[in-house]
């Protein structure tokens, strides 16, 4: 039996012939961008998966996902540093700076 160039799997044995392209639909993009920003570390999985694709649109989705993930991680670090400094200032104010 011949294998078509459009087949992803062998019709006889089920062996993977090539990987399926990632979904680039708008709902999938919304999900990826949401996960990348609000659940930052998990966005890295999407980012690298899409960056490995040969399709230009998939690479763009991967790059945006990576950028959002990095932005979210940096934002969390900055907010944590600001919050910590404010708390130390409050503690020092209450204790008279005796820490």
Image (tube, rainbow, N blue to C red):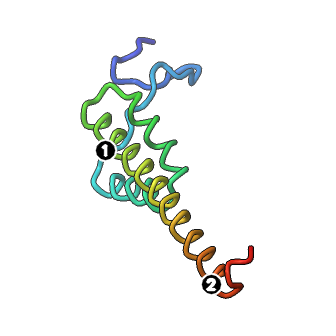
Given residues 92 and 7, the one toward you in this image is: 92
Q: Residue furthest bottom?
A: 94
> For mark 1, what is the residue?
24
Locate the C terminus and report the quarter of the image it occupies: bottom right
State the residue at coordinates (34%, 23%): 6
Give residue 43's position: percent from left, percent from top: 48, 49
Q: Which of the two marks, 2 or 1, is nearer to us in this view?
A: 2
Give residue 60's position: percent from left, percent from top: 28, 38
Tell me: 21 left or right of 91: left
Element at badge 2? helix
State the residue at coordinates (55%, 65%): 80
| Figure quadrant of residue 85 | bottom right
Label 2 vs 1, first from the N-terminus: 1
Given residues 72 and 32, the one toward you in this image is: 72
Locate the N terminus and report the quarter of the image it occupies: top left
Element at badge 1? loop
Give residue 78's position: percent from left, percent from top: 48, 60
> For mark 2, what is the residue?
93
Q: Measured along the vertical axis of the image, is residue 45 above or below residue 21?
A: below
Q: Measured along the vertical axis of the image, is residue 22 above or below residue 26?
A: above
State the residue at coordinates (61%, 82%): 90
Q: Residue furthest right?
A: 99
| Figure quadrant of residue 94 | bottom right
């Amino acid at each position: 039996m011949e294998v078509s160039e459009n087949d992803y799997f062998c019709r006889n044995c089920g062996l993977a012939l090539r990987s399926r392209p990632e979904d680039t639909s708008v709902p999938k993009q919304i999900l990826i961008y949401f996960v990348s920003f609000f659940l930052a570390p998990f966005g890295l999985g999407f980012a690298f998966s899409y960056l490995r694709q040969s399709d230009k649109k998939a690479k763009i989705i991967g790059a945006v996902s990576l950028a959002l993930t990095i932005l979210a991680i940096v934002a969390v670090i900055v907010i944590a540093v600001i919050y910590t400094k404010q708390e130390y200032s409050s503690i020092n104010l209450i204790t008279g700076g005796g820490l």
